[in-house]
Amino acid sequence: MATRNILTKEEPGLYKKCRAVTDFNDRLHQLLDDMKETLSGAQGVGLAAPQVGVLRRAVLVIETNVPEDEDEYVIELINPEIIETSGEQYGPEGCLSVPGEFGLVKRPMNVKVRAQDRFGQWFEVEGTGLTARCFCHEIDHLDGVVFTAKCDRMLTEEELESGEY
């Protein structure tokens, strides 16, 4: 495994639509493993392949909604598509590609995703709260959309520190 560089908002590759993954091989597995190490090092909750310069439809999301006695874990989503949403949440959102900046974004509270695993097997997974937000945020990256394009407004440092927005 290796840590990869995370592209920042100035990089044109972040705004390009990704191609589907068609080969479920060692190269894909290496990408996913590298992304996991990169995400861990960056202390984020999600990472999409285009953020590390690979225009393929692959994302990682950390499931944070776990019981106190269990560890959070990484969900790998290859060729993901949102198939169902419900509810609504509104709050601050950030991005590893837009370091230190946060904006107010409306997202669904619950999201169901259909995706493939690293071996090409289809599965469905549901997320709520932060996990639902991450599913939407990371899948947006696959279509070249950065959260700043969806936020109502960016937050100031004072607003972030006070929690009043």
Image (spheres, rainbow, N blue to C red):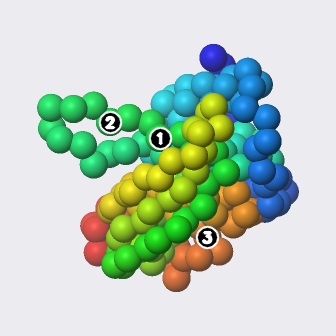
In x, y percent, where is residue 142? 70, 57
Where residue 44 is drawn, which disc sits there? none
Q: Amino acid at mark 3?
A: Thr
Q: Are marks 3 and 2 in contact (CB under 8 Å)?
A: no
Secondary element at image label 1: strand
Q: Amino acid at mark 1?
A: Ile
What residue lies at 71% left-to-right and 49% top-to-bottom? Answer: 57
Real-space Cα separation, disc 3 to disc 2, in angstroms: 27 Å
Residue 33 in view: yes
Q: Are marks 2 and 1 in contact (CB under 8 Å)?
A: no
Q: Amino acid at mark 2?
A: Glu
Secondary element at image label 3: helix
Where residue 148 is drawn, which disc sits there? 3
Residue under label 1, please give it.
75
Residue under label 2, please give it.
72
Q: Residues within 10 Å of mark 3 (few under 14, many from 20)?
A: some
Mark earlier in primary sequence (3, 1): 1
Q: Residues within 10 Å of mark 1 (few under 14, many from 20)?
A: some
Q: Vertically, is 156 above or below 72?
A: below
In x, y percent, where is residue 138? 58, 55
